Amino acid sequence: MDLTGREIVLGVTGGIAAYKSADLVSRLRHLGARVSVIMTKNATEFVAPLTFQTLSANQVTVDTFQAPEYWNVEHVALAKRAEVFVIAPATANILAKMAHGIADDMLSTTVLATAAPILAAPAMNTGMWNAEATQENIRILRRRGVRFVGPDSGILACGDTGAGRMSEPAEIVEAIEKILNPRRDLEGLKVLVTAGATRERLDPVRFLTNDSSGKMGFALAEAARDRGAEVTVVKGSTTAPVPEKIHIIPVESTEDLLRCMEKEATEQDIVIQAAAPADYRPETVSGIKIKKKKGEEMILRLVETPDVARRVGELKRPGQTLVGFAAETDHLEEHAQAKLAKKNLDLIVANDVTRPGAGFGTDTNIATLITKDGMEEQPLQTKRELADRILDKILAVRAAARD
């Protein structure tokens, strides 16, 4: 990892995690980066500006109206200087200001003025992190291209346990490096990713579905996009934020998904089927809402839905790489290896959805990458981290197929 000469502006806000930011500055400096630090007034209550001044070898900026080292409008100068603008810790307060364009101190003024990529490392109480206001602000910022690292889960300074702990400096450095030195090893390739759950209608207001949020599929789509691929996402029902700058094709039922994949999949170099299509649908669909009948049971007859992955495997063309997912609750490897062969896959990502930190709706995952040549265990990590590991494995499979 080399950041020699790269210009990084670090915003430090008022949270107990500010002490970690001193380590962050030290790590960036050791990698050769030039770091300029902006502190909020509250941040100086946790760590003295002199600490950051010593570690960064630069004057620390706190007051919007303090005399700058050289004649320039300081917030404009720092905004222009940044190749990446990092905020660590990023409190709920600064995220709210960023989301709504409030510029009432040096940090919020400068981040509003910058055109550089912005990376936020949130740190706050679990209740504040989970609050709808905070989550809405994050959704707004993500839509504008702000990137996030963390927060991690664990015991917080307030004594609560849950999400809200700032990511470790090493993880933040890795996220910075990916922004400044992005890999482009998927340029020229077309990648299709399926994401989310399908819905099988019972009547106009009810349906059968599952817990898939789309997070894993979207993480794969974002990682492939950032590595230079032309990405298409076939999206069922999802609760995760939809990625930007990606072609989205919405579907509802498993039959819809099948028709879409028959049309789109053969044009792709890589097909990653991370969606969770329903295995069964109601035999009949009512055109009107089914009413409760007092004292009577309702018997629901289900029939199998099409096997989309198997059909995509039948249509596989030379040079194409097919990837599937196996979300299991028992006999993980046995079931996954059977699917690998049955559906003509090159790689299958298997995970036990009963394990803590894995499965539907979480920001993390635990997986085993299985090919016909062997298995590779992946430990607990964020879904975005796992997405990059999966893409690395896909490229290795494609390279082996060419040899």
Image: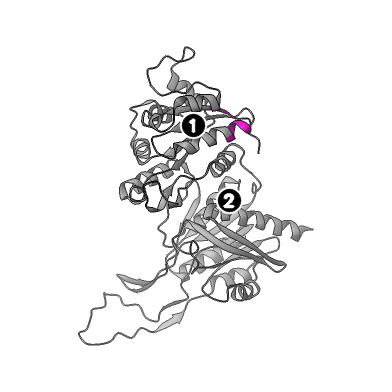
Contact, CB < 8 Å: mark 1 with mark 2? no
Q: Please state which of residues 112 and 290 is positioned toward the viewer in this rendering.
A: 112
Amino acid type, label 1 = Leu
Q: Residue 332 in the image: x percent, y percent?
A: 58, 73
Of labels 1 and 2, earlier in sequence is 1
| Residue position for label 1 | 10
Q: Residue at x 35, y 72 (%)?
A: 207
Amino acid type, label 2 = Ala
Q: Which residues are magenta?
A: 27-35
User: Residue 373's mark?
Assistant: none
Q: Viewed as shown, does residue 292 lie left or right of 212?
A: left
Q: Nearer the viewer, mark 1 or mark 2?
A: 1
Q: Please state which of residues 113 and 235 is positioned toward the viewer in this rendering.
A: 113
Q: Viewed as shown, does residue 217 lie left or right of 297?
A: right
Task: Answer few, some or many: residues within 10 Å of disc 1's Cα (few below 14, many 20 plus, some between 14 and 19).
Answer: many
| Residue position for label 2 | 224
Looking at the image, is 48 positioned above or below residue 123? Answer: above
Q: Which residue in the rendered view is the most extreme toward the right?
A: 403
Q: Please state which of residues 98 and 312 is positioned toward the viewer in this rendering.
A: 98
Is residue 117 visible in the rendered image? The answer is no
Q: Please state which of residues 188 and 159 is positioned toward the viewer in this rendering.
A: 159
Is residue 345 visible in the rendered image? The answer is yes
